[in-house]
Every structure is written in structure tokens, then in C-alpha cells.
Amino acid sequence: MMDNSTLCNDAVVKEIAGNEVLVEMTIKSACDGCHAKSVCISSQRRNELVKIDNTAHTPLKIGDSVKIGIKQSIGNQAIFIAYGLPFVVLFVFFILISVVFGNELVAALIALVATGLYFALLALFNKKKK
């Protein structure tokens, strides 16, 4: 059951392994609904393979069309983790280092390194979850 706070996407089942289902989704760009998309270079689509858990134990077979849903609040959390937190790390490290050392160039370099380490830890955590 999907409501207004759920983002939905159509997908096709590609592989089934126990409760894990590999589906292929077509990801549309944000400008997909634009009237000028036929002449615009930036309107694009790409196919993405996504592994999901079939927690509802829905009987599926390869080739079935399914609808994948994600709560909008989870999407907002992902945006905050990808954009908000790195900005906070960059800003906080820049301010702290510039106050401690008094050198903005050193502060900027250390802040960029700290932000890079944040993304490296995020990638490491993402690999562990897979």
C-alpha cells in the first residue's frame, strides 16, 4: 500500500535468491516531465540494478513487473547524509582549524581532507552493508 509520502518506481524482477530479489529499475532524470525533453541533452534515463528484501514474501518470478516504494523520509535522510553532513564537516573543521592555527589556507586544506575522509567512511560503511 503506497501513500503520498512514498516514492514509487516501476521495476522488473531479474533474479531471485531466497528472500532477496534483484530488480532492474529505470531511473529518470528530474527533467523527465519537461515539455522540452525531446530536444534537451540533459534529459536522460539509466537502468539500475537494485537488491531488495522480499519481506512480504510475495510470490515472484523472473520477468515480473513490480512497484518499488521508499518512504520520502528515508529519501530526505539520504539527502542529508550526502549533502548536509559533509557541509557541516567542512564548515566546522574550517572554523575550528582557522581559530586554532589562524591560517585559512591550512584550515581549508584540513577541512577538505576531513570531508574526503567523511566520504571514504561513508563508502566503507556502504560496502559493509552490501
Image (cartoon, rainbow, N blue to C red):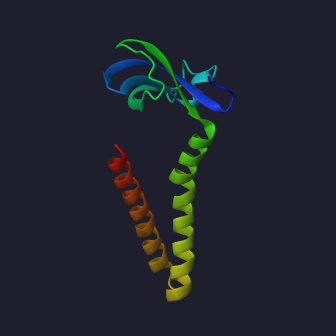
Residue 11 on image: x %, y %? 45, 20
Q: Quadrant of residue 114?
A: bottom left
Residue drawn at the location 39% of the way across and 24% of the way down:
23
* Of the pair 42 and 97, the residue shown nearer to us: 97
Which quarter of the rendering shows the N terminus? Answer: top right
Which quarter of the rendering shows the C terminus? Answer: top left
Judged left or right of residue 75, residue 121 is: left
Residue 86 on image: x %, y %? 51, 60
Residue 92 on image: x %, y %? 56, 72
Q: Is residue 102 in view?
A: no
Q: Is residue 121 in view?
A: yes
* Of the pair 104 and 39, the residue shown nearer to us: 104
Residue drawn at the location 53% of the way across and 29% of the way down:
29
Q: Does 121 appear above or below 61?
A: below
Residue 93 on image: x %, y %? 51, 74
Please identify the residue farthest to the bottom as the structure is shown: 101
Residue drawn at the location 57% of the way across and 52% of the way down:
80
Q: Does 15 appear above or below 85?
A: above
